[in-house]
Image: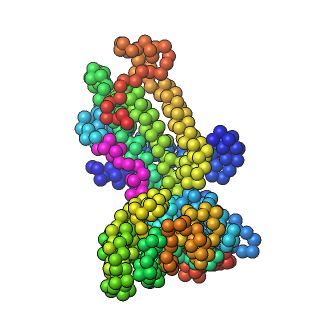
């Protein structure tokens, strides 16, 4: 009875929807509507595509307006979904949108074979992963240990590790140990012997994972480590770093620079890092940055990338 | 906020207030029509036969599910089965959620309305030779109408207020202003959106009150009744409704 009721409900719903589908879909039929609306000189690739992302992405300076300003890319239409969450990912997977604003280390990217379009003009400011540490704790041995970790870490690696932690729900500490072993950083040594370091993390999975990676790498070098994970947001843990409640936390270069210097304009990886080194206030310092970045990206499916030969956001502005 | 509402561009632009108001009404109407089609016959049947009362309990239990969570769950479950660019994949979960909200008050009030029909009236109808279906149509439904309307008004209020979540799934509706305003920290837009939703709900409720006044038989609404509260309705005001059953208070 209950089952019959449910299916009747769905059927009734579908019928009504089919009835109003003809009027409702006229606005969202991007294929015909989009290409005719594009600027002169033929239809661009982007004008045939639907972009999806968070509500603020539609209006914020590095969102839809930024794509137009920096790359001359105007999508056929914009679908307001969520900030790289289940809505955007599912819509991209199932073809309701052709491109989505998703974060570069999102586990859905390796899981679905999505293609991250390159951002050669740095529309999105660099967000390299790096350790933010209390200067007094950054002994040469500690620094060299963490720098060795950063040297091995890149965006693809981090995305893969996120799959284990976020999708497969594996223990972040075990994932950290496994990765360090796979790149040969688990060898015990004495570089950080005698150091006593309290490691914190922000309250999201990737930050926890990175904190565990730092922790295990330093432990292998003889440091005495305690962890305080899932602390909260930057507003909470930066004062904690300054007053010594914690000594070390994984951070992202672009947002950290904005936090210390809201007027900063640097966007490229090297510029952001240079500006950040100057902007970090007294008791703190940043160590070497890794090439791993977790930032906004325009992501398409493999099929779309192959069909229009897309590797960079700039390719979307070409006629296709 | 007043300034935002006073800007004519915000009303007439593509995706402006008029567009979203219309979209909002469409989402709400689809849900209400489907809910009436489902709940009214079912409620009459349950009330008439006295069987299947547990369905009312089940329907009420469904209301305790969090709307936004259910919406995302349904979307993630349905999305792999619906391809292409249309809005169906967003509309279907939204409408299911709204229907699930609208059915319980309608069902509960219809059942209660039929059950509360004076047994003497029902006996009289049977005595006049009416068959089951005729009793339902000619006696039980008209007598239950005030309670059915109270359920419909409660359902309408909830559906109009909750249709705001359509915007969360990338659809339009007045919720668009609430979500977009919140996301871009345009609080005037957000507050105006919320105000418009509230106004729409109140206006819809008033319209239904008027419809109720002209649909419900005057005999039922109390004019010829011997109930002590008959005097209030005799003055021409909207009929005094019997207290709704405890199960359908929100």
Taking depth in this image into account, of B3 and B63 the one nearest to the observer is: B3
- Quick check: B189 left or right of A169? right
**Residue B102, picture quadrant:** top left
- Compared across the picture, whether A79 is left or right of B83 comes to right
How many circles with numbers are drawn on the protein? 0
Instruction: Please state which of residues A62 and A5 is positioned toward the viewer in this rendering.
Output: A62
Q: Residue at x 45, y 40 (%)?
A: B158
- The correct choice, above or below, for B151 with respect to B169 in the image is above
Quarter of the C terminus of chain A within the rendering: bottom right
Residue B66 within the magenta-colored segment of the rendering = yes
> Which is the main secondary structure of the residues drawn in magenta?
helix
- Residue B26 relative to residue B4: left or right: left
Whole-percent x, y for residue B244 in the image: 35, 29
Q: Residue at x 75, y 74 (%)?
A: A41
Q: Position of residue B143 (x, y in %)?
A: 37, 26
Residue B81 can be seen, yes or no? no
Name the one closer to the observer, A272 or B176. A272
Q: Residue at x 58, y 68 (%)?
A: A279
In the image, what residue occupies the spot 42% across and 51% down?
A: B68
Extreme right residue here?
A40
Quadrant hosting residue B151? top left
What's the colour scheme?
rainbow
Is residue B235 highlighted in magenta? no
Q: Position of residue A112 (x, y in %)?
A: 44, 75
Task: Find the magenta span and give its range.
Answer: B58-77
Q: Is residue A106 above or below residue A22?
A: below
Q: Nearer the viewer, residue B20 or A171?
A: A171
Q: Position of residue A116 (x, y in %)?
A: 53, 76
Q: Is residue A315 visible?
A: yes
């Amino acid at each position: 009875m209950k089952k019959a009721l449910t299916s009747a409900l769905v059927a009734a719903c579908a019928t009504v929807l089919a009835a109003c589908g003809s009027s409702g879909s006229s606005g969202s039929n991007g294929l015909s509507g989009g290409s005719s609306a594009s600027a002169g000189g033929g239809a661009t690739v982007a004008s045939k595509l639907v972009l999806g992302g968070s509500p603020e992405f539609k209006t914020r300076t590095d969102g839809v307006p930024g794509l137009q300003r920096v790359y001359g890319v105007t999508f056929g239409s914009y679908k307001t979904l969520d900030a790289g969450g289940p809505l955007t990912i599912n819509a991209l997977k199932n073809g309701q949108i052709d491109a989505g604003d998703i974060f570069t280390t999102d586990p859905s990217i390796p899981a679905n074979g999505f293609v991250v379009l390159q951002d050669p003009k740095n529309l999105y400011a660099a967000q390299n992963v790096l350790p933010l540490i209390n200067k007094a704790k950054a002994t040469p041995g500690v620094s060299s240990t963490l720098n060795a970790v950063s040297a091995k870490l890149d965006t693809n690696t981090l995305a893969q590790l996120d799959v284990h932690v976020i999708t497969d729900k594996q223990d972040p500490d075990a994932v950290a140990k496994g990765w360090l072993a796979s790149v040969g950083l688990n060898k015990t040594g004495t570089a950080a012997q005698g150091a006593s370091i309290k490691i914190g993390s922000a309250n999201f999975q990737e930050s926890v994972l990175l904190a565990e990676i730092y922790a295990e790498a330093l432990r292998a070098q003889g440091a005495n480590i305690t962890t305080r994970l899932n602390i909260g947001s930057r507003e909470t843990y930066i004062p904690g770093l300054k007053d010594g409640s914690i000594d070390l936390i994984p951070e992202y270069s672009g947002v950290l620079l904005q936090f210390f210097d809201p007027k900063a304009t640097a966007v490229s990886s090297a510029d952001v890092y240079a500006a950040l080194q100057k902007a970090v206030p007294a008791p703190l310092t940043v160590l070497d940055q890794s090439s791993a970045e977790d930032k906004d990206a325009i992501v398409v499916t493999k099929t779309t990338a192959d069909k229009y030969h897309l590797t960079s956001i700039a390719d979307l502005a070409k006629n296709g | 906020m007043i300034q935002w509402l006073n800007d004519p561009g915000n009303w007439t632009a593509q995706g402006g207030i008029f567009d979203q108001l219309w979209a909002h009404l469409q989402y709400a109407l689809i849900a209400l029509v489907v809910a009436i089609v489902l709940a009214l016959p079912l409620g009459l049947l349950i009330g008439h036969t006295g069987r299947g009362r547990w369905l009312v309990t089940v329907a009420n239990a469904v209301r305790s599910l969090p709307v936004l969570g259910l919406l995302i769950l349904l979307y993630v479950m349905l999305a792999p089965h619906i391809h292409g660019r249309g809005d169906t994949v967003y509309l279907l979960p939204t409408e299911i959620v709204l229907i699930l909200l609208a059915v319980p008050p309608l069902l509960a009030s219809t059942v209660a309305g039929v059950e509360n029909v004076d047994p003497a009236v029902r006996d009289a109808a049977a005595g006049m030779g009416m068959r089951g279906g005729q009793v339902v149509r000619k006696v039980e439904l008209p007598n239950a109408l005030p309670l059915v309307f109270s359920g419909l008004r409660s359902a309408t209020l909830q559906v109009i207020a909750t249709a705001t979540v359509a915007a969360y799934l990338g659809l339009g509706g007045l919720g668009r202003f609430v979500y977009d305003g919140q996301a871009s920290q345009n609080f005037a837009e957000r507050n105006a959106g919320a105000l418009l939703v509230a106004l729409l709900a109140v206006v819809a409720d008033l319209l239904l009150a008027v419809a109720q006044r002209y649909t419900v038989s005057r005999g039922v609404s109390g004019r010829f009744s011997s109930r002590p509260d008959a005097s209030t309705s005799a003055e021409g005001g909207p009929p005094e409704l019997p207290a709704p059953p405890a199960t359908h208070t929100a």
